[in-house]
Image (cartoon, helix red, strand yellow):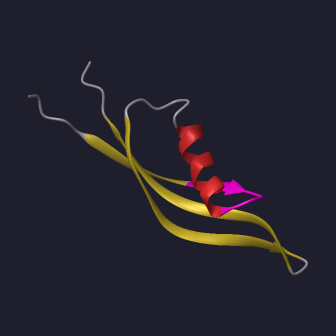
Amino acid sequence: MTDSVYKVIELVGTSPNSWEDAARNAIEMAGKSLRELRIAEVGKLDMKVEEGKVVAFRARVQLSFKYAND
């Protein structure tokens, strides 16, 4: 078994519908350019408010991915 190294980054995903969709959007967007995604942890949830109404849900996500050993 070889040793592995992982990097952790922080992303903010948004959605007009829900925090779950916001987190999913962040992960799916990252998955388009990063390989070997491992663990995602939602650290903070908030909402964008305009004129007294919620217009967007935001999820701050820490995502780890494996460094390539090429």
Q: Quadrant of residue 62?
A: bottom left
- Looking at this view, name the residue that lies furthest to the top: 70
Give x and y (percent) for residue 59: 59, 62
| Quarter of the C terminus within the rendering | top left
Q: Quadrant of residue 28?
A: top right
**Residue drawn at point x = 91 percent, y = 78 percent:** 51
> From the viewer's perspective, is residue 24 above or below residue 3?
below
Q: How many marks?
A: 0
Left or right: 31 with respect to 64? right
**Residue drawn at point x = 64 percent, y = 55 percent:** 22
> Does 7 appear in magenta?
no
| Quarter of the N terminus within the rendering | top left
**Residue drawn at point x = 62 percent, y = 46 percent:** 25
Give x and y (percent) for residue 68: 30, 26
> From the viewer's perspective, is residue 39 above or below residue 29?
below
Q: Which residues are magenta?
A: 12-18
Left or right: 30 with respect to 15? left
Give x and y (percent) for residue 27: 53, 44
- Viewer-proximal residue among 57 and 69: 57
Q: Quadrant of residue 2?
A: top left
- Looking at this view, name the residue that lies furthest to the left: 1
- Looking at this view, name the residue that lies furthest to the right: 51
**Residue drawn at point x = 63 percent, y = 62 percent:** 19
